[in-house]
Image (spheres, grey):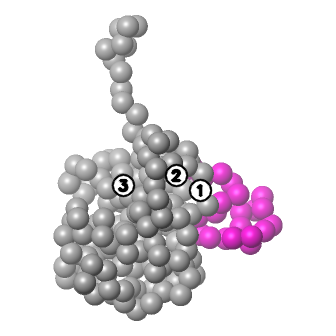
Amino acid sequence: MTDTGVPHTPSRLLPDEIHRAVGPGTALLRLETTGSRQSLLDGAWWPRSRDVEREVPPLITALTEHLGPITRVGLDASAWNDIPVRLVVDDRVVHLDSFPVGDDTALITRGDNDHFSLMVVPPATTPEAARTAMARAVHADNVTQAADILLAELPHAVAPSGSASPDNDEAPGQ
């Protein structure tokens, strides 16, 4: 309890220091910690670019540490630059699938048939908006689709589909 008699509830957001300390090649990832897998999303990932060969290996390494060996990653072909059919990460082959489904999720496969869905926060997102969206995505009782979380939490200049918003006539990455 605080001095005012009101119980203190810890923030669900990662502190700014976490984001400032993250170096190149580090995956910014949050996973649902209850293990219930009752929510719509199993986690959230904030890549720093759309370069698959730079962003996906740290993600796979982090996921493997928490979930076990990852065999496949599904990404939206229109949201990523040059998706190869496979990557070798930590001496393991990981197959990459590309689908025209929208860049708001990545589908992760562990083993033969165990799937995880991660919300993908667009790289240009501000740290505050990314933290808020990621915290909402991993909430154990979340029933909101990734696209809806991103639309609610991100500034209007960043559209989750990788396209320009109605308020911004510039193409992404310009």
Q: Please provide the residue range marked out in magenta.
A: 152-174
Residue 118 sits in which quadrant?
A: bottom left
* Disc sitting over residue 130 in the figure: 2
Residue under the point 46% across and 59% down? 23
Spatial CA span between label 1 and label 2: 6 Å
Q: Mark 3 belongs to which amino acid? A: Arg
Looking at marks 1 and 3 on the same chain, the residue that comes earlier in the sequence is marked by 3
Helix, strand or loop at label 3? It is strand
Spatial CA span between label 2 and label 3: 11 Å
Q: Mark 1 belongs to which amino acid? A: Thr
* Disc sitting over residue 30 in the figure: 3
Residue 119 drawn in magenta: no
Relative to 76, residue 19 above or below: above
Residue 174 visible (yes or no)? yes
Residue under the point 36% across and 79% down? 73
Residue under the point 30% across and 65% down? 62
Residue 164 drawn in magenta: yes
Q: Given contact means CB atoms under 8 Å apart, are the residues at marks 1 and 2 in contact? A: yes
* Disc sitting over residue 125 in the figure: 1
Q: Given contact means CB atoms under 8 Å apart, are the residues at marks 2 and 3 in contact? A: no
Q: Mark 2 belongs to which amino acid? A: Ala
**Residue 88 place in picture, x, y as percent:** 32, 86
* Disc sitting over residue 35 in the figure: none
Q: Residues within 10 Å of mark 3 (few under 14, many from 20)?
A: many
Q: Which residue of the protein is positioned furthest toward the right in this rendering?
A: 169
**Residue 20 place in picture, x, y as percent:** 51, 48
Q: Which residue of the protein is positioned furthest toward the bottom in this rendering?
A: 85
Looking at marks 2 and 3 on the same chain, the residue that comes earlier in the sequence is marked by 3
Q: Is 87 left or right of 162, judged from the image as shown?
A: left
**Residue 165 place in picture, x, y as percent:** 71, 63
Relative to 12, residue 150 above or below: below
Residue 1 sits in which quadrant?
A: top left
